[in-house]
Amino acid sequence: MSTEVRRDAWGIPHLRAAGPHELVHAQGRNAARDRAWQLEVERHRAKGTTAAFLGPDALEWDLFVRRARLDDTARRCYAALDPETAAWVRAYVDGVNAGLPEGAALAPEFAAAGVEPGRWEPWTPLGVWISTHILFAGFPTKLWREEVARRIGEDALTLFATDGPGAAGSNGWLVAGGRTAAGGALLAGDPHRFVEAPGVYQQIHLSCPEFDVVGLAVPGVPGIGHFGHTGHVAWAITNAMSDYQDLYRERLRRTADGGVEALGPDGWRPAAAHTETVEVAGADPVAVEVVETDRGPVIVGGLGPEPGAEAAGGPAHSPAISLRYPPRVTRRLGFEALPALLRARTVDDVDRAFDRWAEPVNVVQAADTAGGLLHRVAGFVPKRHRDNGLRVVSAWEPGHDWGGAHPLPRAAVAADGVAVMANQRGIAAPLGTEFAPAHRADRITELLTATDAGWTAKDMAAVHTDTHLASAAPLIALLADLDGLSPAATALRDRLVRWDRRMDAGSHDASAYAAVRAATVHRLAAHPALTPLADVHADYPALFAPWLFATGKIAYALEGLLTTSLLPEIDRAEVVRAAVEEAVVQDVPWGELHRVVPWQALPDADAVWPGVAGDHDCVLSTSSVPGVTHGFARGPSARYVWDLARREDSLWIVPLGASGVPGDPHALDQLPLWAGGELVPVVTDPDLLTPETGHPQQPPRRDMPTDDATPVFEQHAPGLGTVTIAPVDPDADAGVIHSWVSQERARFWGMNGATVEEVRDIYAHLDSLTTHHGFLLRLDGRPVALLQTYEPAADRVSECYEALPGDLGIHLLLGPPQGGAVQGYTAALLPVMIAFAFADPSVSRVVVEPDTGNDKAVERMRRSGFTLGPEVVLPEVVLPEVRLVAKKARLAFLERSAAEGL
């Protein structure tokens, strides 16, 4: 079966292929076709190279990415994947690279920015995931709390606790079958993230003989991790608001030899340090010193003075702040869960898949067609001192290290009940410090339990779009008690007291409330009790401003600030009195002021975006920053309803459209429906889909047998089968070789991080040489090992011993054994390799160079008749095509006479 691409009426891609690898390759190719510019931006964001084409405005992000070592962390996490998952991710990356030329040709942004599409590496999807979620846990809030405690007192440490503009939340709810019209559960919700153009989620349908899944994919990441429906089981997530990232106050100093040390509980210890250069379009490049202590990479502050400054009266060290985050420590993201979710058929399958999840920490809900229900937390939350979760802690004080992982809570869901997750202090309460106010969760629960039964998928739109603003109560209560106001202020007070507290797009009263709220925020920000916080954001990187900007923090904590017993010096009634007197009310509908402003890498100054109902604490959570702007950038980045009775009755919507190509008919066709709170059907009926013409065929799966080249040697291996040896065909064999040499165990082959195309080029170069050759060993037609032969006199090994005429060097790299681990697999293949080497009558001695740390390989050579030679250090060699890293090796030699006796 070739890969088939179809589209529904909304341009949503429906992909079908012969197997999971072919399908994920098609998913990558489709993402590149539909979202080439978006993928290019995400690739650069993950590497910290966006300023090179977006200019100085992107510099702060790039500096953070470099300092936090996000790209290196992605490489580490990729290297730690199990081989099956790694191969699946690589297939997606190969699809992206295959589709980028076509996608880039359709995207005018490349020409506008003056960039060419770059190649994706196997770890790029992991880098995209990390860069997308690194700020989800809101670690900059700890900087804010630290400053609050220092500037206005320890009692105020948690005074501003709330879900702020920098955080990412979501609504999600599960209605059990006992409360629905069709008897199957309904799973619905909407993730609240920054609305971007193109959108952060892609509606997609993935089908092969093993599974058939619809869901919301993250462009640049394989599979469907957050919201999916397999026809048998559906799942959805929200941010658990857990705390799992720590900040440490560091003391750093330079050493006399130019190194760096950091002070820890056990004294001064070496820290890793190097300098990187960030290119900036239209400006000079910026050098950034990257420092990593035993806690983690330094993201704020820097190093102390040069050696000798202390003696001259300078400081002994400089303050800095490091970040400790789980993927950097554990080398896990949870990507192993992604292919498992696609195959899930029950909530137990979903549960097991999310057992492997790590980053970010989510609340998961799931339901299946048999009535199974699931409500749990998934992810990694380290156990450590309580202060770690509140503020910046001192690296040199003991007791702030990590000690294992917290157990993950779960909750039962009754067969006739509802379960709501909206970032509130609920199931994940033991794992976090700050949660969203309960308003959204309470309102959703109220709506869902207003009737005992009869819910349908279409009914859920009314929940998605509810605009009741419960958090307005404290301000309205203070208004109601005011007297002695001017006539205009009295009229405004009376109007708001009568207001129904709905932030509807057509409501003039909602606009009036927003004006009084903004004035109240400004009044509080100007109060002497809070003005010490006014410049907090100026002391830290601008990237963290959403968490540190006092006006924004006051705006989102307004409900608490108007009711707290702390800060008694603030007369709240007088603050509100002044606000209602000075409020500038625009007598226009709320939707005229409250417009969505999507983030774009290349902003379109001429774009006019629609007005939308809702507000931060409404179920329809469209989050402006009161006192700063009525426009909003964070809101529902998708809406979904998964119907477990009939998947074809499921519904969804995204803010813009399925395509990321400007001018495409499906680039903005869902926008008016999204703004109006409507949903579109999930279509899976092939008769309602239109085939996409001209889509290239799927290449063979990389780990499937390739067509045998003409063997130059053949021998039976007892207990295994027939082994053939044939020269490497660079074009046909690059895929399978890449899947082996890109693994960590093959690092000394010098091709970790190489792409398939680069591997092909390396072996094409090897094929042109007369001194070095590459061969594939096949067992009953299946590639099982890579064999390279070389003349030692023409190789780096000649620098370590005296190469003799007739010497032949060999390298052997085993692929995964057929059918899994086989006892004696290597021992059975080794005689075949030796026989092949001595089949050339000019060869008198075979030379091998196993790593000195590989005791099994050294002992295997000895048992096979090799004479062990000296331990040597093979020098690093950099060729135009490949870098062979330096390594310690144990030379071993096998004479022809000894081989003939084996």
Image (spheres, rainbow, N blue to C red):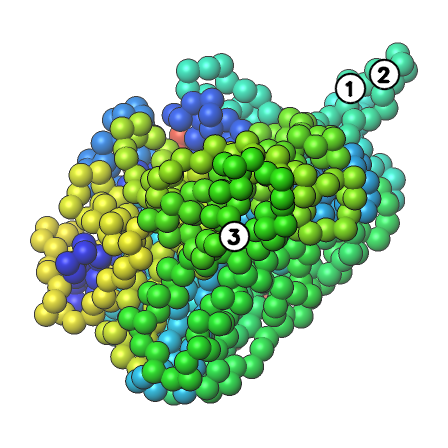
* Residue 255 x, y percent position in the rendering: 80, 25
Left/right of residue 665 with respect to residue 679 in the rendered view = left
Which residue bears the numbered disc 1? 305
Which residue bears the numbered disc 2? 314
The answer to which quarter of the image holds residue 190 is bottom left
* Residue 174 x, y percent position in the rendering: 44, 74
Q: CA distance from mark 1 to mark 3?
A: 61 Å
Q: Locate the N terminus by quadrant.
A: bottom left
Which amino acid type corresponds to the residue marked 3 in the rendered image?
A: Val
For marks 1 and 2, the one nearer the N-term is: 1
Would you say residue 431 is visible in this rendering?
yes
Classify mark 2: residues with Cα within 10 Å, few (<14), some (14-19) or many (20+): few
Name the residue located 48 percent from the left edge and 32 percent from the top edge. Answer: 584
CB under 8 Å between discs 1 and 2: yes
Name the residue located 29 percent from the left edge and 71 percent from the top edge. Answer: 458
Would you say residue 704 is visible in this rendering?
no
Which amino acid type corresponds to the residue marked 1 in the rendered image?
A: Pro
The numbered mark at residue 497 is: 3
Classify mark 1: residues with Cα within 10 Å, few (<14), some (14-19) or many (20+): some
